[in-house]
Amino acid sequence: MDLKDTIEQIQSHIDIVEVVSGYIPLKKAGANFRALCPFHQEKTPSFMVNPSKQIYHCFGCGAGGDVISFVMEYEKVEFMEALSILAHKAGIKLPAFKRGDYIRRTAAANFIYRINEMAASYYNAILIGSNKAARAREYLRRRGINAQTAAKFKLGFAPDLWDGFLKYAQKRGISQDAVSKAGLAIPGKEDSFYDRFRNRIIFPIFNINSKAVGFGARVLDETLPKYINSPETDIYIKGRHLYGLSISANEIRQKNEVIIVEGYLDLIIPFQAGITNIVATLGTALTVGQINLIKRYTTNTVIIFDADEAGEAASLRSLDILIGEGLNVKVATLPKDFDPDKYVREKSADEFSSIVASARGLFDYKMDISLSRYGKDTAEAKAEIISEMLPTIKRMDNAVLKSDYIKRLSQSLSVDEKAILIELKKVRLDYIKTPVTTTFKVPQEARAAESVIAALVLEDAEIARRIKDEFDIEAFNDQRIRKIIEHSFALLDDNKQPTAARLIHYIGNEDMSQFICHLLAEVENIIDREKTIEDCIRWLKIDNLRLKKEELASQIRKAEKSGDDKEVMTLIKEFNDLRSVKI
């Protein structure tokens, strides 16, 4: 019996309601069970257990998964230990698995951890004691980083060698292929490999348990690319980690506030100066996975923007996600040409702390940006401001706050509150939170339709087979949805029904587990499922047709520029054929 068969056997003998109720008190809520979430603090129960799907989902913090995921998270144990706990409960004897049966979850992950720890020690030792790192030590000194801080963050240096770490690892019995799988080497020609990081300062990235999961690397000058980073591996998914959190977690909890910056040095320099409740986002917009990490320690966040990005619409929209996840969001803006690193070095930590202390609530911050952008002298300007502010208000759970912000919006723009409330009802943050209608817009609703299809595929074997007959995997543009559909099709080929519990362990990714549970929790609101699936299939086809037309139009433009008249005519015919397609 292999691992997947054992998982299914345990799942078939274990009731998630019985297991979860052994840890926390559950109350019946319709077809489901409800409780206060054990993974974050809350006063109103938002943690749901679904006995028919054998999954759990928290609408507050986003936690979700199957019974194995729950035991792993609650008991803080690895996959195989959680499986052992549940096997004991079910009276099932676990067979002695071969290493290959669970290499992805345990052995491979542990092996990469080992390689990463080896690499972190190697780079750190070179920084501290090698003549090859003299320039690197001077660079850190010029940037204001002292030896104690470098040691605390385990900074390192990758020498200017093509195979420095590869040779170091080989002497310790680690193959080049294994180093490559850990993201520390890149395949070259004829089965050769070379070091990913060369002649760069190394910033190890640690998970919350202080294990090295990846690395960032910076050049010693302004050569581009300035930074390169580890690729994603079995243990490193960028959107699930925050730089510095393992060091700053206790301070964040004690101060009940986290300062969020973007880069390594933007964190290290303030931290060295005594501002220790701080994390960095690894250069990306905040993800739900990172937000869930933050919520373990605080719900109060201060986002640091520099003057260049402070008014960017995309940056502001990304902050709405924090509101939707129940965080109290404030925004602080640094003066032009300053980032946290430079500001603390050239001004002071006290002045930086004053800027943090004067951070403004997201509503007020966005309102000022919108007023400066549009003014409020015309009805059109007011409509633009309201359209930008309402998604923020819509995401707020607190009815008192919503009412207050609507009133302030009304007074500031001299617009009747009733008119704003009417517009608020039109705001749709998530298509699958409401019953599906036929009034879609393309492509937004078409992309949302992918989510509905994926969820219904996991609920209904007939729908799953129908989708497999009508679509290829490439028809789905969202990568997470595509992964769900791909595994669902594979299960159908294996004469097995795609279910959430199966996919959670076929995919083996915490973020995907939460995403699957979120999808399933949301589609419970859909009333007419037959009508819904018809609409979703139609709009997915429309969107795929749109994308094909866009691609052909691009090819036609290229052919025209190159003067290939024959190719132009061929492509135009294909384009016209697509225009005649009726859906």
Image (cartoon, grey):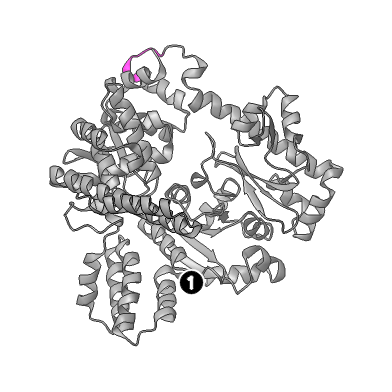
Q: Which of the pair 211/470 is nearer the observer?
A: 470
For the point 52% across and 69% down, the residue is: 332
For the point 72% across and 59% down, the residue is: 222
Q: Residue furthest bottom?
A: 377
Q: Main secondary structure of the magenta part?
A: loop
Q: Residue furthest right?
A: 131
The answer to whether one can see residue 43 in this image is: no
Compared to 276, does 107 lie above or below?
A: above
Q: Position of residue 438 (x, y in %)?
A: 16, 55
Q: Position of residue 207 (x, y in %)?
A: 56, 41
Q: Position of residue 93 (x, y in %)?
A: 38, 12
Q: Position of residue 398 (x, y in %)?
A: 30, 62
The answer to whether one can see residue 404 in this image is: yes
Q: Which of the pair 433/228 is nearer the observer?
A: 228
The three-letter code of the residue at mark 1 reads Gly
Q: Is 559 placed left or right of 473 in the picture?
A: right
- Range of the magenta residues? 89-94
Asked if the stretch drawn in magenta spans residue 260, the answer is: no
Compared to 575, does 367 lie above or below?
A: below
The N terminus - image quarter: top left
Q: Residue furthest front?
A: 566
Q: Is 476 placed left or right of 104 in the picture?
A: left
The image quarter containing residue 492 is top left
Q: Is 301 placed left or right of 112 in the picture?
A: left
For the point 41% across and 35% down, the residue is: 74
Q: Dot 1: what SS?
A: loop
Compared to 303, does 25 lie above or below?
A: above
Q: Which of the pair 525/183 is nearer the observer?
A: 183
Mark 1 surroundings: few (<14), some (14-19) or many (≥20) residues within 10 A: some
Asked if the stretch drawn in magenta spans residue 90, the answer is: yes
- Residue ID for mark 1: 311
